[in-house]
Image (cartoon, rainbow, N blue to C red):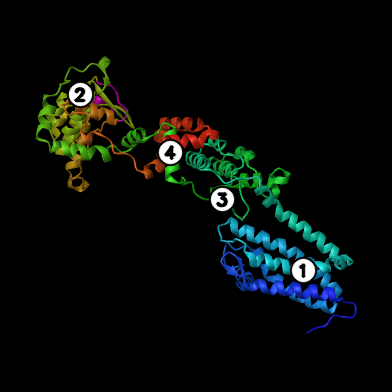
Amino acid sequence: MPKLGSSASPDSMRTAYFGLAIFLFSFFLPAVGSLIGFQCAFWALTSWNHQDKISSLALFGGWLNPMVLVLFFLSIFRRAPRIRSVLTVTILFSIPMTWIAIYRMAVVGMYMDLDVGHFLWIAGILVIALPNVRPAFSFSLARWLAGGAASVIAFLSVPLLIALTMRPASELDDFFYVVAWTLKEPSICGKISANAIGRPDQRDSTDFTYMQSDCYRNIAAMLHAPDLCSHVKSASIDRLIGSPSAKLSCRKQQYTLGTAMPGTEPNLIGTMRSMGLGDEQLAEFLYEERPDNYLDPVLKILRNDPAFLSRLTAAPNYDEPFRLENRRSAHSLEFLDDIIAIQSDIPSLCKKISPNAQAQDFGGHFLLRNACFSNVAFNRRDESLCGNLARAGDIQQPNHGDPSRAYEACVKTVAILRDPRTHLQSFRYPGSYFPTWPQFQEAIQQLGYPSTTPWLQLPHPVPEQYANYFLYVAQPQHVTARADFVRRVLAIQSASSLAFRQTASR
């Protein structure tokens, strides 16, 4: 066993060996996560540069072990005082660097809970190193190293201290973020808590970001609106001087990072219901988005009902002379006459539609009766039905051209559809769907079907359709729905959000 030099005391020797015993014993105990001390030592030296989630600072934990052993042997022999001073400062610097590494890896989702082995390891290191602290500072090099080490630790600790003022984002914060990102609506970013932690996919390091800042930054890039970058703040050292680097980076960003999918479904649905967008409202919106998905199965049931066609034929007839000043929106039964006439190839039902009845599509208003006869003519490939179209004197319609030329256009289209070279022989026009589901319900009830008929009820939306609602209203054709949705979101009171969602989900 090595002996101390002439200047060593028995107490210092016992202290050194006691520290070494604790240090070595810690390698056989659970230390960090699921690893024991030996595994941690090997892992810190070999794995730090192999995975994205492993902090490069973990290498300091690996260096500590050989440095502590060297310091122990130099201390008991009282050799190389300058080297011991450097080792002492380096060891004391490496301990907090190891803790910072553990913190960073825990932030990105690694299991890094500290166990008894880690605490005994640190205790053993300190027992060996602390007696060398006072002698070490007698050397100017050690003092300079200590000053530099303290500066580095302070620099790296700032994000950790800032993180103490932050809190995990709530479901409502996440909801605001997703809505703002999807609709490119910066006013909703302000609804996010100023202290909420941003999503992991928005970080380019292990440092936290602010969700509100990420929201403004992404929308600034999508809208090419650098003025929004004034709302961005850093959660790192840049924060101490007003986050100029974060703001500059925001102004340079040309595209968005990460994702904007909603959080958990129950909270998402509860939040939307609390805004007045429950199953009924969402189902009606989804019908207007794709009426064929909901109406075609019901129309198939009706066409298989022997009483349906006789009821429709006996229903009110709206035929009347055409008058420019008598133009009006089509009645519910007229829409039903139109779609059944086209899908079941019954042109006589088109005659029940008033020539003054109008419908609307993306191109504007059009005469429903004209469209009915035209579509039946197209489906039959029969130009003789084109003679039923309104002639000269009808209203000009932007999407159907001049009605005075409707007959010629109809005949020309039939000829194109009949031409085998167009490969359109099997194509059929579906007709004009009801603008809203309640209009369809009204028409069916006028035929004598009770309102409690099961297939007259829209199916309840599934959770995925709630999540996709953001994408629906973001589409250019849904300007009104988007404006209404934004208004509802901005009206949410963050302070009462939890009670709001709980009440809505009951």
- Mark 1 = which residue? 127
Q: Give x and y (percent) for residue 112.
A: 59, 61
- State the separation of the CA atoms marked 4 and 2: 51 Å
Q: Which comes sooner in the sequence, label 3 or label 2?
A: 3
Instruction: Say left or right for 228 vs 451.
Output: right
Nearer the camera: disc 2 or disc 1: 1
Q: Residue furthest bottom?
A: 1
Do callouts 4 and 2 mark residues in contact (Cβ within 8 Å)? no
Q: Which comes sooner in the sequence, label 4 or label 1?
A: 1
Instruction: Say left or right for 491 vs 324.
Output: right
Nearer the camera: disc 3 or disc 2: 3
Do callouts 4 and 3 mark residues in contact (Cβ within 8 Å)? no
Rendered image: mark on residue 390: 2
Q: Amino acid at mark 1?
A: Val
- Mark 4 = which residue? 270
Do callouts 2 and 1 mark residues in contact (Cβ within 8 Å)? no
Residue 396 painted magenta: yes
Q: Residue at x 56, y 42 (%)?
A: 215
Rendered image: mark on residue 110: none
| Kind of element beneath mark 3 | helix
Q: Which comes sooner in the sequence, label 4 or label 2?
A: 4
- Mark 3 = which residue? 202
Do callouts 3 and 2 mark residues in contact (Cβ within 8 Å)? no
- Mainly helix, strand or loop, the magenta region? loop
Q: Give x and y (percent) for residue 470.
A: 43, 40
| Kind of element beneath mark 4 | helix
Task: Out of 441 and 432, give the one closest to the viewer.
Answer: 441
Task: Out of 378 and 330, give the one closest to the viewer.
Answer: 330
Q: Amino acid at mark 4?
A: Gly
Highlighted range, magenta: 394-404
Q: Which comes sooner in the sequence, label 4 or label 3?
A: 3
Instruction: Say left or right for 311 vs 152.
Output: left
